[in-house]
Image: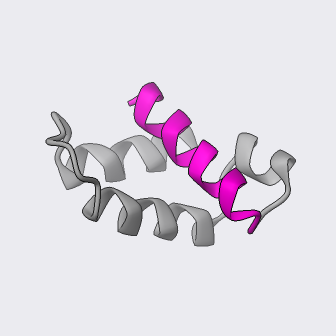
Amino acid sequence: FVRLRDEFERYLLQQNKYPSGEIHGDWSDKIKGEFRTWVGKYPKKLMLSAKDIDEYLQKEH
């Protein structure tokens, strides 16, 4: 999951939508929502289910 999160954070930085501290710190609900959308469009097959991702986001942030 860490690799996926890092890739998403790089994506957000490239989009210049949020300050670095907001991306690398605890995610807001808005960023979590964007992450779920981004994962839904992820071009590679993931070993994580939507449930796994939701559980991680609830625990981690």
Q: Is residue 40 magenta?
A: no
Please report the residue visible at 61 percent of the width from the left and 45 percent of the height from the top: 9
Please report the residue visible at 15 percent of the width from the left and 34 percent of the height from the top: 47
Horizontal arrangement in the rendering, residue 58 relative to residue 45 (left or right): right
Please report the residue visible at 41 percent of the width from the left and 36 percent of the height from the top: 4
Applied colour scheme: one colour
| Percent of width and height locating residue 3 | 44, 27
Please report the residue visible at 25 percent of the width from the left and 43 percent of the height from the top: 52
Residue furthest top in the image: 2
From the viewer's side, name the closer residue of 41 and 59.
41
Q: Note whether 24 is above or below 50 in the view shown.
A: above
Horizontal arrangement in the rendering, residue 33 relative to residue 55 (left or right): right
From the viewer's side, name the closer residue of 22 and 41.
41
Q: Quadrant location of the N terminus? A: top left
Horizontal arrangement in the rendering, residue 11 relative to residue 41 (left or right): right
Predominant secondary structure, magenta span: helix
| Range of magenta residues | 1-17
| Percent of width and height locating residue 21 | 85, 46
Q: Is residue 11 magenta?
A: yes
| Percent of width and height locating residue 43 | 23, 52
Q: Note whether 20 is above or below 47 in the view shown.
A: below
| Percent of width and height locating residue 49 | 17, 47
From the viewer's side, name the closer residue of 60 and 36.
36
Horizontal arrangement in the rendering, residue 59 relative to residue 42 (left or right): right
